[in-house]
Amino acid sequence: MNLSIYNWDLLSKHFSNFSLSSKDLTKILQKQFSEYNLFQVGIVCVESEYMQRLNREYRGKDYVTDVLSFNLDTEPLMGEVYICPEYIFSNTKQELFQEEVIRDIVHGLLHIAGYDHKEKLTKESIDKEEMFILQEKILKEVMKL
């Protein structure tokens, strides 16, 4: 998988102790997603205003969100994952910020790989959804490294 990360410096703007470099994260994600037939993926960190605009334009929802993913092509699988560090930081305990950023990236990559989940989730249903089980398994492996 060819993986590119853009605007990684936005993370340090909101959390100066983010320990993973974009280069290290790229290597880890390429290893974890090697079996998913992803050809080319871009991960883009964006500000809140841009994320809200994307969410409004493509999903009809006029608010900021943590992660959005877009499939650009299906043969081979290509896509983009947008994350909003500012939104994630404001909705996460500081000590869990790095983990939540990685969780959101993994979540977006799984969407591009073809996984989906119910629109309306409850605390109980999250633990049973195949996508979230896989997401947490991959996250656990990434956080070990």
Image: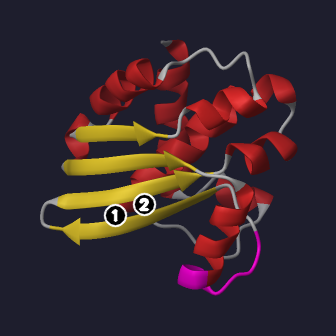
Quick check: 124 above or below 134? below
Q: Position of residue 37 (x, y in %)?
A: 18, 49
Q: In front here: 80 or 110?
A: 80
Quick check: 113 above or below 36? below
Amino acid under disc 2: His
Q: Is residue 43 visible?
A: yes
Quick check: 74 above or below 3? below
Could you tell me which residue is drawn at 69 percent across and 70 percent down?
52
Left or right: 114, with 136 as reference point: left
How crowded pointer 1 is (Cα within 10 Å; few <14, some 14-19, many 20+) is rated as: few
Q: Residue at label 1?
A: 114
Q: Position of residue 140 (x, y in %)?
A: 54, 26
Q: Position of residue 90 (x, y in %)?
A: 86, 45
- Colour basis: secondary structure
Q: Residue furthest bottom?
A: 60
Quick check: 134 above or below 77? above
Amino acid under disc 1: Gly
* Residue 76, magenta (yes or no): no
Q: CA separation, marks 2 and 1?
A: 5 Å
Could you tell me which residue is drawn at 60 percent across and 51 percent down?
46
- Secondary structure, mark 2, is helix
From which residue to which does the magenta span run?
A: 57-63
The numbered mark at residue 111 is 2
Q: Are marks 2 and 1 in contact (CB under 8 Å)?
A: yes
- Secondary structure, mark 1, is loop
* Residue 61, magenta (yes or no): yes
Where, by quadrant of the figure, is residue 97 drawn?
A: top right
Where, by quadrant of the figure, is residue 94 drawn?
A: top right
Q: Position of residue 73 (x, y in %)?
A: 22, 69
Where, by quadrant of the figure, is residue 63 drawn?
A: bottom right
